[in-house]
Image: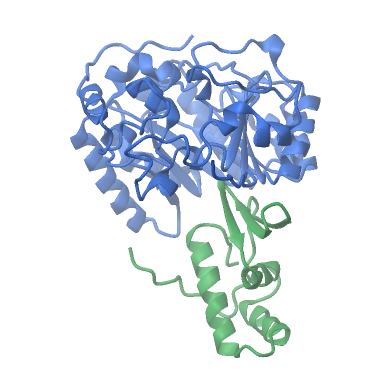
């Protein structure tokens, strides 16, 4: 076996809690949520952040669930600042207000990403499963800008809102965002329950891609638009998490360290916990992180593919979910022997009511 | 998409906005620019330019200062490098031109 050089990770996704007031049908958190009593304390997080920085991590993404469900969020943000990490709050905005946000800014918060479900109030609140969410999000976005923090607006797109890409970007501009993410639903966790109700058609996707191109040219220098072609309609897979165990790690509310946030959906992987192991040990030596590092684990067509060091065979979770084996090529790749399964899944589209996450 | 950089005047006073910062990190092998959900590795020249983007010095001052620090590089070359870098960053919303 050839020796694998293990690079230093750049980013850490800190899932502070799985609690969340919204009920989004595309929630990507696992089906089994971790209970509040098992959550790491702010002191635990401060230690994890110090260990992460020593390992080379530069940015911490404070996520969830809704991170503002944690009353000690300012203390957690201060822990990131004390470790000299760049901190990014990923929030639904529900549970936060201007005063709470100011405390986070004082604690050293660097950037805020606010998710908005659509460019229209009724549709946005329906998708979030929370009446009044849209107005609260807009209000918090304004507070972010007022405090002088950089703002990203994140919109998850799917069949019900994909035709609103233009007003979504205009809304982000009007709110003062410097960046907008047009993120297609990823079908993991809870989102799988609603796949048929969320799946856009190829025509919808292609139109959205064209609109994004036009918007980018139109608003160049004013707003950065990050958007990618959704998995199920791509020719090649995404380089999922920048390659397994290469760039990032994910810590769950109870302290389990995962190579990606959906990794627990792959059976047989052994995850280590920050309560029992130093983060550097977990990164370098835990079985889960080493399971799909390098290229030795790959099957054909990945093994001899010229793109294997570019997309790393795509997403391991998706390979398991669709091809039934995490060592297979991500079936969204047109070279995968299981690719027709993806085409069949994308063809199943029905306007069924959402199964909300409650 | 065209690659024409945004034009930058010699009087502009460039500054890294809140949420964008230059930092040195041994484990990542040197200077890095941290920005919203992005990390850019900065080579030595880039780092020297960005360190001078304080919001006080003008582009003219920065080029002047760099010309002294890198005496063997022609001033026009330094000016071109500075304008190219700052224009690219401003377009990505990672720099205020003041």
The quarter in which the N terminus of chain A is drawn is top right
Front one among A322 and B48: A322
Is residue A258 visible to the viewer in this orientation of the structure?
A: no
Q: Which chain is green?
A: B
Relative to A57, does residue A223 appear above or below in the rendering? Answer: below
Q: Which picture quadrant has residue B62? A: bottom right
Above/below status of A48 relative to A58: above
Q: Quadrant of residue A253?
A: top right
Q: Is residue A18 left or right of residue A333?
A: right
Total label count? Answer: 0
Position of residue B3 measured from the top left corner of the image (x, y, whole percent): 38, 69
| A227 displayed left or right of B58 | left
| Above or below, A126 relative to B63 | above
- Give me the residue at 50% from left, 24% from top: A262
Q: Residue furthest front?
A: A1
Q: Is residue A338 above or below residue A5?
A: above
Which percent across, then down, holds residue A75?
78, 30
Closest to the observer, A231 or A333: A333
Which colour denotes chain A? Answer: blue
User: What residue is rendered at 68% in x and 81% in y?
Assistant: B66
Q: Is residue A86 visible in the rendered structure shown here?
A: yes
| Residue occupying image coordinates x 52% and y 17% | A268
The colour scheme used to paint the residues is by chain
Position of A268 with respect to B43 (left or right) is left
Residue A68 rendering spot, x and y as whole percentages: 64, 24
Residue sitting nearer the eye, A82 or B45? B45
Relative image position of residue A87 (x, y in whole percent): 66, 40
């Amino acid at each position: 076996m050839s020796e694998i050089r293990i690079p230093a990770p750049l980013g850490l996704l800190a899932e502070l809690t799985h609690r969340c007031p919204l009920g989004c049908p595309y929630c990507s958190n696992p089906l089994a949520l971790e209970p509040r009593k098992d959550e790491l304390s702010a002191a635990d997080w401060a230690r994890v952040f110090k260990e992460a920085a020593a390992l080379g991590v530069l940015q911490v993404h404070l996520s969830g669930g809704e991170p503002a469900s944690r009353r000690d969020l300012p203390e957690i943000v201060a822990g990131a600042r004390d470790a000299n990490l760049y901190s990014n709050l990923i929030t639904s905005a529900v549970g936060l207000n201007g005063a709470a946000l100011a405390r986070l800014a004082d604690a050293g918060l660097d950037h805020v990403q606010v998710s908005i479900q659509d460019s229209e109030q009724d549709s946005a609140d329906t998708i979030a499963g929370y009446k009044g969410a849209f107005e609260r999000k807009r209000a918090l976005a304004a507070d972010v800008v007022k405090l002088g923090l950089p703002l990203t607006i994140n919109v998850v797109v799917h069949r019900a809102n994909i035709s609103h890409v233009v007003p979504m970007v205009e809304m982000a501009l009007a709110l003062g965002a410097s960046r907008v993410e047009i993120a297609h639903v990823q079908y993991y966790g809870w989102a799988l329950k609603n796949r048929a109700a969320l799946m856009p058609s190829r025509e919808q996707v292609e139109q959205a891609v064209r609109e994004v191109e036009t918007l980018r040219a139109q608003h160049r220098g004013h707003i950065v638009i990050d958007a990618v072609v959704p998995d199920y309609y791509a020719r090649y897979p995404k380089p999922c998490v920048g390659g397994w165990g290469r760039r990032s790690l994910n810590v769950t509310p109870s302290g389990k360290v995962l190579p990606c946030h959906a990794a627990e959906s792959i059976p047989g992987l052994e995850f280590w916990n920050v309560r029992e192991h130093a983060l550097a040990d977990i990164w370098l030596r835990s079985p889960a992180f080493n399971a799909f590092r390098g290229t030795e684990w790959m099957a054909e067509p990945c093994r001899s593919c010229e793109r294997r060091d570019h997309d790393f065979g795509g997403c391991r979770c998706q390979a398991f979910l669709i091809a039934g084996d995490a060592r297979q090529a991500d079936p969204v790749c047109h070279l995968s022997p299981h690719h027709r399964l993806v085409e069949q899944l994308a063809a199943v589209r029905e306007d069924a009511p959402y199964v909300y996450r409650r | 998409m065209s690659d024409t950089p945004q034009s930058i005047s010699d009087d502009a006073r460039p500054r890294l906005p809140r949420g964008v910062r230059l930092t040195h990190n041994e484990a990542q092998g040197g200077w890095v620019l941290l920005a919203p959900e992005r990390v850019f590795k900065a080579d030595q020249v880039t780092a020297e330019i960005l360190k001078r983007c304080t919001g006080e010095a003008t582009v003219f001052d920065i080029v002047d200062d760099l010309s002294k620090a890198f005496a063997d590089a022609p001033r026009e070359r330094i000016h071109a490098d500075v304008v190219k870098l700052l224009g690219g960053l401003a377009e990505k919303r990672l720099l205020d031109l003041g």
